[in-house]
Amino acid sequence: MDEWLAFYSPYFEEQDEAKKFVEACEMQTHPNNVAKIMMHQVQRLVSLSDDMQKIRPNDDPLKLLILIMCAENIAKLHDGYTGESKSWHYVDKFFKGFLSDSDKDLLRHGFVDNNDKWLGFLSYEDVVKMLYKIRCDVVHEGDYLGFSLYDGKTEMLEIVKNYVVIPHVTLQEVRAIIIRGCINAIQSKL
């Protein structure tokens, strides 16, 4: 219990709420234990992304890959999907269905579109497509060096295929957004 509480507590206003959440998940038994499996998977995958910081500290695409894998995995578990395809469908479903409006706004305002000298924010749909594209570049092309999120100090121009952006969102913010979305998905299964 302590491992799960330590991970999930920062995402609840009260420690008691986190404890109730973890206990409700842990009480699930086979074959109706999807919420428990989801809760464990989120902690495992996000922790793996965190550990990647020790191995490859400046390679945000590797960490994003694991976070996007987590989102995909949670959406598939939520739907009971056991196939090996439909990655885009489930990543899109996660970002559309499990994020709060405020987290969608954080992502929407996290990337300044610098295409064609027009400065504005990417649409929410384009943010999700771009994050998925980064995931695909790592998985299919082995490109884990070509993108950096905002480090809190220096703005950088980043290019991901059709997207030319200046990130204003940090990896930690994306991580928190995905965890909160996962909690929403898990709570809808309880």
Image: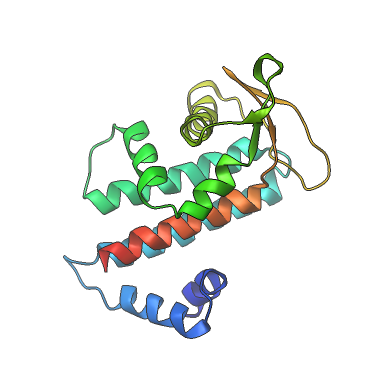
Residue at the spot 38% in from the left edge and 52% down from the top edge:
98
Residue at the spot 48% in from the left edge and 42% down from the top edge:
68
Picture quarter with the C terminus = bottom left
Residue at the right extreme of this rendering: 153
Residue 85 appearing in the image = yes
Residue at the left extreme of this rendering: 31
Give above or below for 188 relative to 172: below
Give above or below for 133 relative to 59: above
Residue 144 spot, x, y in % from top left: 62, 30
Residue 78 spot, x, y in % from top left: 27, 53
Q: How many marks?
A: 0
Residue at the bottom extreme of this rendering: 16
Residue at the spot 35% in from the left edge and 48% down from the top edge:
97
Left/right of residue 108 with respect to residue 36 in the rendered view? right
Quarter location, residue 151:
top right
Left/right of residue 78 with respect to residue 2 in the rendered view? left
Picture quarter with the N terminus = bottom left
Residue at the spot 47% in from the left edge and 30% down from the top edge:
129
Quarter location, residue 17:
bottom left
Give above or below for 188 relative to 93: below
- Nearer-the-camera pick, 23 or 141: 23
Residue 161 appearing in the image = no
Give above or below for 132 relative to 28: above
Colour pattern of the rendering: rainbow
Residue 77 spot, x, y in % from top left: 28, 51
Left/right of residue 158 with respect to residue 91 in the rendered view? right
